[in-house]
Amino acid sequence: MELFDSHSHIDVDAFDADRGDVMVRAREAGVVGQLVPAIAAAGWQHLRDVCTLFPGELHAAYGMHPMYLDEHRPEHLEQLREWLQSPGCVAVGEIGLDYFVESLDRERQQFFFDAQLRLAREFDLPVVVHARRAVDAVIAGMKKIGGLRGIVHSFAGSTEQAEQLWKMGFLLGIGGPVTYERAQRLRGLVATMPLDHLVLETDSPDQPDPAWRGQRNEPARLTAILAVVAELRGESPNVIAAATTANAMRLLRRASPGLRL
C-alpha cells in the first residue's frame, strides 16, 4: 500500500530536531511521497534544502500563505516567478484566502492570491489552496483567472461548493478533521464524493486526529485518516490508498513529468 500526503509542512522548525526519524516513520506507514507547500518567501530556501535531502519523497511547492500576510511584499512575487521555474517545483502554494482571522486585510489577501493564481496559470502549475471560511471567494477568484487546477486543502465547505470545484477540475484535500465524529457534514461529503477528486493529507504538524490530539502531527498519521475515509465509504483501505495516490500523481506529473514514486 502506497500513500501520498498531499499537504505536509515537514520543512518547518517543529521537525528540525528529528526530521529523519519522522521520515522513517512515514515510510514504515506506507507514505511514499509528500507535497510540501511553502508559507512565506523567507522559508523558500530552507524548504528546497529539506526537499533535496529526500529526493523522490518530498516535492516542493512555493507560494505565500494568507495567514502570513504581514511577511509578504510585492517584490516577493517577482522572486516567486524565479522559484517556480526551479528544479523540483511541482506546484504553487500554499496560497489562498483566510476569512476566519478577522485582522487579515481581505483586499491585500486578494491581491497576493490573484497574483499567484496568474503565475500558476502562466507556468501551468497546480495550486495548493487555503480557503478557511472563504470557499466562495476562493472559487470566484479562481474562476476569474481561469485555466487552473489543483487541491483545495483541508476542505470544509458545502456539497454545492465541492461540486463547483470538481467541475473546475480541483481535488479536495481531506485530513485530520474528518476523523472527528462531530464533523458530520464533512463526513457525509467524503462518504459520497467522487473518488477521483479525493486526496489525503495530514497538514503536519497541525490538525492531528483524535488519537494524536495535543501532539505534533506527522505524515505517518496519514494511516488514521485513510482508515476513517475507507470506513465512511465502505471500501477497502487499499482501494482508497491506490486511488488517492493516483489522483495526486496525476495532478503533479503534469507539472513534473519525470516525477516518480
Image (tube, rainbow, N blue to C red):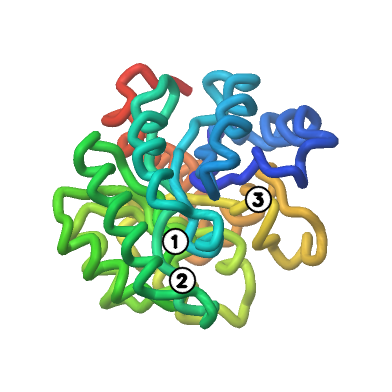
For marks 3 and 2, the one nearer the N-term is: 2
Give the quadrant of residue 121.
top left
Residue 189, disc:
none
The label nearer to you, 1 versus 2, is 2
Q: Residue at x 19, y 57 (%)?
A: 168
CA–CA distance between discs 3 and 1?
15 Å
The residue that mark 2 highlights is 98
Give the quadrant of residue 254.
top left
Quarter of the picture containing the N terminus is top right
CA–CA distance between discs 1 and 2?
7 Å
Residue 99, given in percent of the width and then of the height, sits at 45, 77
Residues tagged 3 and 2 counted as in contact (Cβ below 8 A): no
Element under disc 1: strand
Mark 1 is surrounded, within 10 Å at the Cα level, by few (under 14), some (14 to 19) or many (20 or more) other residues, namely many
Element under disc 2: strand
Residue 230, given in percent of the width and then of the height, sits at 52, 57
Q: Residue at x 50, y 62 (%)?
A: 69
Residues tagged 1 and 2 counted as in contact (Cβ below 8 A): yes
CA–CA distance between discs 3 and 2?
19 Å
Camera-nearest residue between 39 and 208: 39
For marks 3 and 1, the one nearer the N-term is: 1
For marks 1 and 2, the one nearer the N-term is: 2
Residue 147, given in percent of the width and then of the height, sits at 15, 49
The label nearer to you, 3 versus 2, is 2
Badge count: 3
Amino acid under disc 2: Asp
Could you tell me if residue 66 is visible in this image? Answer: yes
Amino acid under disc 1: His
The residue that mark 3 highlights is 204
Camera-nearest residue between 175 and 99: 99
Q: Is residue 255 above or below residue 259?
A: below
